[in-house]
Amino acid sequence: MDRNWWKESVVYQIYPRSFCDSNGDGIGDLRGIAGKLDYLKELGINVIWLSPVYKSPNDDNGYDISDYQDIMDEFGTLQDFDDLLKSAHEHGIKIVMDLVVNHTSDEHPWFVESRSSKDNDKRDFYIWREGRNGNPPNNWGSCFSGPAWEYDEKTDMYYLHCFSKKQPDLNWDNPKVRDEVFRMMRWWCDRGIDGFRMDVISMISKVPGLPDGKVPDNSKYGGLENTTNGPHVHEYLQEMNKKVLSKYDLMTVGECAGVTIEEAKKYASLDGKELNMVFQFEHVGLDYDENGKWTTKRFDLRELKNNLSKWQYELEGKAWNSLFWDNHDQPRIVSRLGDNSPLSAKSIATVLHFMKGTPYVYQGEELGMTNCSFGRIENCRDIEEINAYKDLVGSGKMSPEDMMAGIEAKGRDNARTPMQWDSTDNAGFTTGKPWIMVNPNYKEINAEDELKNEDSVFNYYKKLISLRRNSKWSELIVYGDYKLLDEESSHVFSYIRELNGRRLLVLCNMTDRDINYKCDSKYLSSKELLISNYKDAALTEDMNLKPWFSAVWEI
């Protein structure tokens, strides 16, 4: 068994803009985070993944970086960062930074130079091409709607931006770009950080020649297959590993859009040549439809179970899984898969936290924070939502009502409403005007109330995390083999974890109604109940599973 601290960790993602505001300007900041480290220690997590805090004009909320070695004005200073890092370490908590190096801001000095003339030293730091008959160089589309190319009048050429036009893609085929990125990474590592979550890292190598892509139905743009998992991506990550990552004791996770299991085995191979693990997104795309994510369609449980189980089986002994429901790009899982109730939040958490891999908790998930009803597009702040609304409503493909329903079901702003600390104004997030609306249900769902209530979602998460990190079952939970049960059930999610002759049975009713369940007699020898969201969780042959029932036994 190859033991590592990052396999045995539980990670907590902080979206700094929405976490805690220390100075009343309506925007969360580093001092606000530092003031909540006691809360995070109480929860039991031991790693913070910090969404970007670098200098940025905030076209895409910090994922457009203008200076990798300074801090965004609204978030504080480098001294504030150093203080946070020191205090986190004193609390026994590591900090993983968000590394955004597929693209920069168009306000980054590299790009300012690059666009200044065709013969500038930095011209080849980005991907510039001549137009094609007065049109963009190819048919690639941006992830944020519209073409992936922006015409630049000064040099009469186009630059590639797979996201916003203010996020030009770096040219990783240029070794000088790689050297600059690696130098910057070492600068942060030497400062004392504990790892990197790598934003859209699977996109750093494009197909040579930048050919037109296949155009899916309902779209006028193609190209995704030419921008992800390109021919040199593993070569560049192995170079990064050799020159930077291997020199430090780091946790690394790559956000890998479009990754297949075979590719994941390369990115996160247990040989340690590239990254520790990847984020794959197959399971969170299962409730999309012909309009993509902008739909109220719900998960099919069988499909979801089989997909999650496929990753458990296929990576076994070859690569390490990352486990997540929520992040800053996903709606709240308690609304998406559950019914907004604490019971459903606990059942959904149980399913995830007993799987094999490193679990990630997104801020507020441990409280059962829900999706938010924004009412109208003017209340939204996310560039992806706003652009999609203009595109789909403007073209008549969707009505304003259907589009807003889609945003309220799947939009990224659901994850970005302020953290709900207490029942005072603005949920205790700020004394000023919050940058985005607060979910009106903060008086019913907030940290202050949940810390006092032993039956709260917070205290359930605390127990889940403690079982994984500090219990007699920890090794079994972290390293045990996984086996799905009841594969055809569209109501129950159940599985076995096994290590060295010890076994756990995880049993969850994923519906809001009673379910009759027949337990296989070979699993009836219950030794001990680890956790349940109901008080009377007895393991018997014929069981009536109450709504959202979840329990884990050693058997």
Image: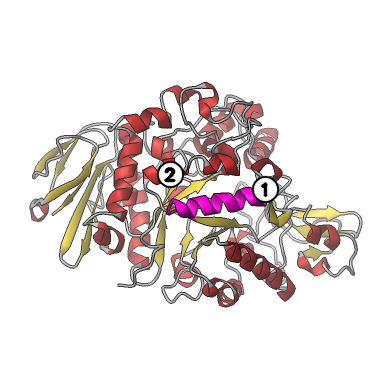
- Could you say which is closer to the camera, residue 236 or residue 145? 236
Queried whether the magenta region covers residue 312, the answer comes back as no
Q: Quadrant of residue 386?
A: top right
Residue 52 visible in the displayed image? no
List the residue tagged with mark 1: 77
Q: What residue is drawn where x is 49% and y is 66%? A: 250
Queried whether the magenta region covers residue 86, the answer comes back as yes
Residue 540, compared with residue 102, is above or below; it is above
Q: What residue is drawn where x is 58% and y is 65%? A: 189
User: Percent x, y for residue 4?
Assistant: 38, 67
Q: Main secondary structure of the magenta part?
A: helix
Q: Quadrant of residue 367?
A: top left
Which numbered circle lies on residue 40?
2
User: Percent x, y for residue 412?
Assistant: 56, 40
- Could you say which is closer to the camera, residue 135 or residue 523? 523
Q: Quadrant of residue 399?
A: top right
34 relative position to 70: left or right: left
325 relative position to 434: left or right: left
- Could you say which is closer to the camera, residue 154 or residue 472? 472
Q: Which residues are magenta?
A: 77-94
Q: Tell me which amino acid carries mark 2.
A: Leu
Mark 1: which secondary structure? loop
